[in-house]
Amino acid sequence: REEEEEEKKKKKKKRGGGESEKGRGSKRKREEKEEEWEFKRQRRGETVGVDESEQDPMFSRSGSKKKEKEKKGGKAMESEGQMSGLVPIGEGEGGEEGEGVGWGGGGPDASSPASFSASFEDLVTGQAGMSRERLDGLLNGLLDFGDEITQLMCVRTVCDYLSLATEESLGSTLRVEPFCKAFSILLSHHNPDIMLLAARAVTNLVEALPSAASQVVSSGLLPPLVGSLLTIEYIDVAEQSLQALEKITLEVPNDVLMNGGLSAVLAYTDFFRTEVQRVAATTAMYMCQRARNSSWEMVSAGVPLLHGLLQNSDAMVVERACHCLAFLTERYQGYPGRVEVLLPDEVLAKIVSFVSDPNSIVRSRTKTGLLRMMGTACHLSFSVVDRLLSLDI
């Protein structure tokens, strides 16, 4: 037995060779304890194979070893909480209840802008929540023009919330029109970051809650969105405003058209990236598809810009422009003079080249639509017939 015990001790020493002095001391104590229990078992005539965890308090759940581990674990959690800045309520720097940064209960009022520093993870998991009171507090923060940092923080929080919200959650908690009015004001802000986040919030709002498009119109949001495209100060704000108009146009195209939307989305397409140019052409197509007789004045202002898109190098942009002209020809087929404005000589020549060239950038489906458009135009105007014949169609 002594030899077996000697071998056990050697093996244990080898295992714990790299440990610290403190660890070696604890192992020594444990070995002494094991020897003591082994001696007691031998005296009682017990076998060596008895499960030690059932008798030795060192291995029991209530033993001192377990308590030491829990104590060390508690200290580690406390140090991690201090490093991350999350200290339980009542354990702040002052040591008094309600001081420090807590997880809930104390601190600033839930409706004040200062309470919106909750982490984005809490927002996603619903721990911070988005009750009506919290949203009202955010609304107050958006309109706090005395504190620009609070405005920026609040508009970022609202933007993140709207990007994750659903139609059901917004319908029960969000008051759409007051927020739309606040976004309308922030779109004219001098801070470009606030302007960008406000335009993004509008995009997320209409995408999550399409029925809010009518309230966007009634709250006066369209003029600042259109204005940011007509007088471009910041290209990223203009691109985001264009994306917001695309979402709104899907729901209320004629309202956007009547606010000068067609000219706005096509005014500076050459300055945008190809992806953004496609968004502009698609938004214009939505407006032309639903154009009314009463909106001809706004349409005629954007027709030259539509003609310019036919020279674009991107096939999708060119096809969207062709669809725009086909939709407008169909919408205004009772007005021959308007059709002649839509299809001047140079445009007819370009359309004929698209249709006749087998290697043109437009697809066969688009060519079919162009042929149908020319047939409608010929039915309405003899002038169009003469010009097409002169082109040897």
Image (tube, rainbow, N blue to C red):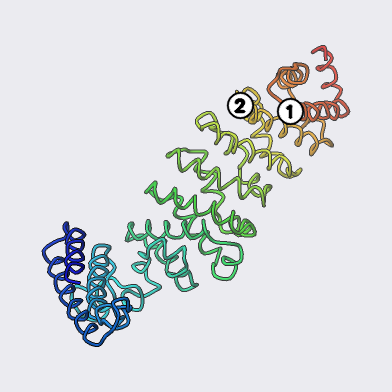
Q: Quadrant of residue 56?
A: bottom left
Image coords of residue 57 (percent x, y): 25, 82
Spot occupied by residue 214 in the image (x, y as percentages of width and height)? 64, 57
Q: Is residue 237 left or right of residue 203?
A: left
Mark identifier at residue 391 = none
SS at circle 1: helix
Give residue 26's quadrant in the image.
bottom left
In the displayed structure image, the side of residue 357 where residue 32 appears, left or right: left
Judge whether residue 10 can be spotted in this image. Answer: yes
Where residue 236 sits, quadrant-wise, is top left
The N terminus sits in image quarter: bottom left
Q: Are marks 2 and 1 in contact (CB under 8 Å)?
A: no
Q: Nearer the viewer, residue 334 or 175?
A: 175
Q: Is residue 136 visible?
A: no
Q: Give x and y (percent) for residue 93.
A: 19, 73
- How crowded is the residue under tag 2: few (<14 C-alpha within 10 Å), some, or many (20+)? some
Q: Secondary structure at mark 2?
A: loop
The picture places residue 283, in percent across and down from the top left corner, at 63, 41
What residue do we see at 18% from left, 74% from top?
Answer: 30
Which mark is on residue 341? 1
Q: Quadrant of the C terminus?
A: top right
Look at label 1 and name its amino acid: Val
Q: Amino acid at mark 2?
A: Asp
**Left or right placement of residue 294 versus residue 333 in this view:** left
Front residue of 60/257: it is 60
Residue 314's mark? 2
Q: Is residue 34 above or below residue 326?
A: below
